[in-house]
């Protein structure tokens, strides 16, 4: 049995998958989870199922983190993630609680996965049907069909190692990284996503089609390791899905599972500090001064924010202030949520609108950190699948534009409306005719909002940029390198951003968090104290 197989077997044995959760006793060890995003909620469920008493604390007034919900003027807007892949990771959480996902949430397939529109008005419908994909490719470059088949087989090979074997296991020691180097070399992980795609596909438009996926997890296709081409096979294998009622329906379902497990949810309360005894986490201190004691702490807060602001530098040897501040961070996002008093039936559920520049625009965003005049956009129209997200006869949308994080120095207070209008004009000229005349509701989220609302370091929307030197062992570890009994989940730790990534980070806890019996017995229900 390989070291990877052994770790997964041990985690599965702890989970007792398919059986009932371990009963939680009053004197069971207490876990505090900072943040109620998908990573935090999944971590809380997994800990509670194993027999830990769990308290989840979030500074927002509702759970979900970046997946919270805005309701405005009769419209429902999912604030963040909308592309649901690898639904088995959600199904597993329900199964651990003795239930099925379908008990609480209806998910439906979306096809095409994406309509990709080029700046000249042509488009490519990206689906999970291999024959249809070949036909789409042939419309642009028949000579690239064979290259696509070979690329997809490479994606399958990378998926088998990169996702099935490595996404759910920790990289706590340098030896863990050394063991996978031969496989990484064989998979050509030294190449970038764009570089690997270009090895097989020659048409410039098709190279964009098959290299854009890293942007969904905060990475530049020209910088991030080609291991992220596994997304192509992941989407083919499990499809792209939508939760009826919006992504918020998944959040409500997860919080319902936690209620059933007896977990405590404290919303609208901000953690200001992780309390320590020496270099061991002992709980959290809230903005109110209240201290919640704990046997272990799980942070679903931004990893960089956790180390830079929730822990004293004197207690940190690995993630020092200097290292946190000098690391590379993902781009941020400008997100515009809006509703219209007419429908646009020709617009698909997911549309990607590529601008006139590809690499040059990404260089502006990731390297030069300047706000360009042009943009590429992701347009989400949930009402294509679920009319309940808007009043009858209306459409709900959100559009996001990748933009540089706050190191750009852009004053979003003064620039937000100008930028929104530019996006509106572009959409009105392309896929949403007369958009401004039909607007009935509108709100925006800027990089400053990512900083202020989610405490995202530098306003980066996806935490650390997923380049090779910030992946696996070189990313903040799931079991903190610096603090005993502190664990990390979410986009900033292994394996990274995106719904599959953050849910997998919670699954890693099944391996790195000891069983409840390993913690010293304590008095029932540790009382909170006020400093």
Image: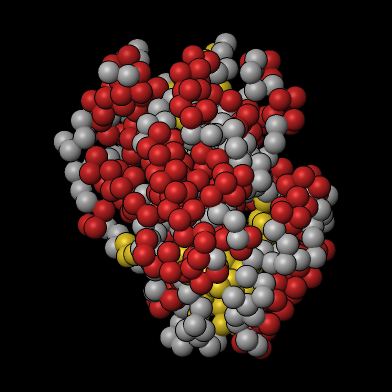
Residue 273, x across and y down, in percent: 60, 29
The residue sitting at 70% across, 32% down in the picture is 327
Q: Farthest residue to the front: give it.
A: 143
In the depicted structure, whether residue 306 falls above or below residue 349:
above
- Given residues 336 and 85, the one toward you in this image is 85
Quarter of image, res 33: top left
Q: Is residue 260 visible?
A: no
Point out residue 44 in the picture as x, y percentages from the top left corner. Answer: 38, 37
Q: Position of residue 317 (x, y in %)?
A: 65, 15
Classify residue 7 by image quadrant.
top left
Describe residue 500's horizontal placement relative to residue 80 as left or right.
left
Q: Decide which of 48, 28 is in the foreground and name it.
A: 48
Relative placement, left or right, of 228 versus 55 is right
Q: Please, is residue 227 above or below residue 402 in the view? A: above
Q: Is residue 469 visible?
A: yes
Query: What colouring does the structure picture have?
Result: secondary structure
> Relative to 368, is 389 above or below?
below
Task: Return the residue nearer the eye: 122 or 412.
Answer: 122
- Identify the residue shown where x is 27% and y is 40%: 261
Q: Is residue 274 above or below residue 194?
A: above
Residue at x 40%, y 39% (from the top left corner): 157
Across the whole image, how many numbered discs are drawn on residues? 0
Q: Quadrant of the N terminus?
A: top left
In the rendered image, which quarter contains the C terminus?
Answer: top right
Q: Nearer the viewer, residue 375 or 199?
A: 199
- The x, y position of residue 107, in whole percent, is 32, 62
**89 displayed left or right of 306:** left
């Amino acid at each position: 049995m390989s070291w990877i197989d052994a770790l997964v077997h041990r985690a599965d044995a702890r989970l007792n998958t398919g059986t009932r959760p371990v009963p939680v006793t009053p004197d069971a060890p207490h876990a505090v989870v900072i943040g109620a995003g998908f990573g935090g909620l999944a971590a809380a469920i997994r800990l509670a199922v194993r027999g830990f008493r769990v308290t989840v604390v979030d500074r927002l007034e509702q759970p979900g983190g970046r997946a919270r919900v805005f309701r405005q003027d009769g419209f429902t807007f999912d604030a963040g993630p909308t592309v649901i892949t690898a639904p088995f990771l959600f199904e597993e959480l329900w199964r651990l609680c003795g239930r099925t996902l379908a008990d609480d949430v209806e998910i439906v397939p979306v096809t095409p996965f994406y309509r990709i529109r080029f700046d000249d008005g042509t488009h490519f419908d990206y689906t999970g049907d291999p024959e249809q994909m070949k036909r789409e490719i042939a419309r642009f470059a028949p000579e690239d069909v064979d290259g696509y088949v070979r690329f997809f087989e490479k994606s399958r090979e990378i998926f088998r190692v990169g996702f099935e074997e490595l996404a759910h296991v920790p990289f706590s020691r340098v030896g863990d990284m050394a063991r996978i180097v031969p496989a990484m070399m064989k998979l050509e992980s030294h190449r970038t996503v764009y570089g690997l795609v270009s090895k097989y596909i020659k048409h410039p438009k098709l190279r964009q089609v098959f290299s854009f996926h890293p942007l969904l997890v905060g990475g530049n296709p020209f910088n991030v390791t080609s291991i992220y081409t596994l997304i192509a096979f992941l989407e083919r294998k499990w499809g792209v899905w939508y939760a009826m009622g919006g992504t918020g329906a998944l959040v409500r379902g997860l919080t319902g599972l936690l209620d059933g497990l007896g977990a405590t949810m404290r919303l609208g309360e901000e953690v200001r500090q992780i309390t320590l005894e020496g270099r061991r986490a002992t709980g959290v201190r809230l903005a109110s001064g209240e201290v919640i004691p704990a046997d272990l702490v799980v942070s679903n807060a931004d990893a960089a924010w956790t180390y830079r602001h929730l822990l004293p530098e004197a207690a940190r040897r690995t993630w020092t202030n200097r290292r946190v501040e000098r690391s590379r961070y993902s781009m941020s996002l400008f997100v515009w949520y809006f509703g219209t008093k007419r429908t646009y039936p020709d617009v698909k559920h997911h549309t990607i609108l590529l601008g006139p520049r590809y690499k040059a625009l990404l260089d502006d965003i990731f390297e030069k950190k300047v706000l360009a005049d042009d943009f590429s956009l992701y347009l989400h129209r949930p009402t294509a699948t679920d009319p309940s997200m808007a009043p009858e006869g209306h459409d709900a949308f959100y559009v996001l534009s990748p933009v540089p994080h706050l190191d750009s120095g852009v004053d979003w207070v003064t620039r937000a409306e100008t930028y929104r209008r530019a996006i509106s004009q572009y959409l009105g000229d392309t896929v949403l005719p007369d958009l401004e005349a039909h607007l009935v509701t509108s709100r925006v989220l800027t990089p400053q909002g990512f900083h202020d609302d989610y405490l995202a370091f530098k306003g980066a929307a996806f935490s650390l940029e997923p380049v090779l030197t910030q992946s696996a062992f070189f990313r903040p570890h799931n079991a903190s390198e610096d603090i005993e009994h502190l664990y990390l989940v979410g986009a900033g730790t292994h394996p990274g951003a995106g719904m599959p990534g953050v849910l997998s980070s919670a699954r890693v806890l099944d391996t790195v968090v000891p069983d409840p019996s390993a913690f010293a017995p304590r008095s029932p229900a540790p009382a909170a104290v006020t400093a």
